[in-house]
């Protein structure tokens, strides 16, 4: 084995939901080619407030044909974070492009990819995302709900050359992180049961071996293996649909979204400390 280097919401009255700056339009999604039969991913750009209070622009794209959603934002330190939800394959992909500190001898950037199982209730469907519009593009949005931190121990490596068998998005999203794509054993077991070929996955050192390793922030020798930590946050994303009641409609209908913030903490094995230079002891 070559080690890698590297919820719905209760129906509510209609009026309050027409006031928010983000609304669901029930017409044809923007980006659908008229008369061509071809669909182009619909894109929405929003200004969002990060957990530290700073503001950045976030790009959200939805492709209802591919049944996928992607989100991308740049952190104040220059790190580019992206998230892809592949509903067809029950896969979500997190990618971080971390800028290096050249004066410390680091490379220009380092890429990481974390692949986990997608629960379809985590985020609104791609068809609904494609219909989202905003009335005031200059508004700064803050999530209505802060979801708890999720800690994940990534104990499996993903074989980039076979990654398309897991999700067609992986080859494109994780191209810069070909040697640093990580997954979890429990998610791998689910995908294997769904028919994904085992060649997609590679074993990392056993958990017992990993647990005996120090955290990278405690290792002085850049050539030694260690356990690396990386945390990222999705500052704002549409996590649930809201439903309204209308006097002329017997059943509730989709009329808006609820936004969430979610943070993730990943631990994973690296064969050399120099592949985890951002992980410093507090």
Image (cartoon, rainbow, N blue to C red):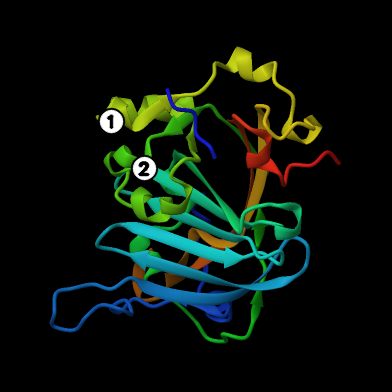
Above or below, comparing residue 155 to residue 43 in the picture: above
The image quadrant where one finds the N terminus is top left
Above or below, comparing residue 34 to residue 126 in the picture: below
Q: Is residue 173 above or below residue 181?
A: below
Q: Local crowd at mark 2 within 10 Å, few (<14), some, or many (≥20)?
A: some
The numbered dot on residue 90 is 2
Measuring 75% from the left and 70% from the top, which residue is drawn there?
54
Q: Residue furthest top?
A: 208
Q: Nearer the viewer, residue 165 or 126?
A: 165
Task: Identify the residue position indicated by label 1 in the image.
Answer: 194
Left or right, 280 with respect to 78, comes to right
Residue 212 in the image: state x and y as whole percent: 70, 16
Quadrant where the C terminus sits is: top right
Relative to 98, is 119 on the left or the right? Answer: left
Cβ–Cβ below 8 Å for labels 1 and 2?
yes
Characterize the local packing of mark 1: few (<14), some (14-19) or many (20 or more) Cα atoms within 10 angstroms. few
Cα separation between marks 1 and 2:
10 Å
The picture quadrant where one finds residue 51 is bottom right
Secondary structure, mark 2, is loop
Residue 220 pos. (x, y %): 79, 32
Please name whichever residue, 120 or 242, is drawn nearer the observer in this view of the structure: 120
Numbered disc 1: secondary structure: loop
């Amino acid at each position: 084995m070559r080690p890698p280097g590297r919820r719905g919401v209760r129906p509510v009255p209609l009026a309050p939901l027409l006031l928010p700056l983000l609304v669901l339009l029930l017409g044809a999604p923007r980006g659908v080619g008229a008369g061509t039969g071809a669909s182009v991913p619909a894109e929405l750009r929003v200004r969002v407030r990060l957990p530290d209070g700073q503001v950045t622009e976030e790009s959200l794209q939805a492709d209802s044909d591919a049944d996928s959603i992607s989100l991308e934002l740049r952190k104040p330190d220059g790190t580019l974070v992206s998230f892809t939800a592949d509903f067809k394959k029950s896969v979500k992909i997190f990618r971080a492009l971390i800028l290096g500190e050249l004066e410390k001898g680091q490379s220009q950037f380092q890429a990481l990819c974390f692949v986990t199982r997608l629960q379809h209730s985590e985020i609104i469907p791609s068809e609904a995302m494609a219909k989202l519009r905003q009335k005031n593009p200059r508004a700064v949005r803050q999530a209505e709900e802060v979801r708890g931190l999720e800690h994940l121990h990534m104990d499996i490596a993903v074989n980039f050359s076979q990654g398309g068998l897991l999700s067609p998005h992986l080859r494109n999203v994780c191209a810069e992180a070909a040697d640093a794509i990580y997954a979890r054993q429990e998610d791998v077991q689910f995908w294997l049961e769904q028919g994904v070929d085992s060649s997609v996955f590679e074993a990392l050192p056993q958990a017992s071996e990993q647990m005996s390793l120090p955290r990278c922030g405690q290792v002085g020798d850049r050539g030694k293996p260690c356990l690396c930590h990386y945390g990222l946050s999705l500052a704002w994303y549409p996590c649930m649909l809201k439903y309204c009641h209308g006097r002329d409609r017997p059943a509730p209908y989709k009329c808006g979204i609820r936004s969430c913030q979610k943070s993730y903490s990943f631990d994973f094995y690296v064969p050399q400390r120099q592949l985890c230079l951002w992980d410093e002891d507090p």
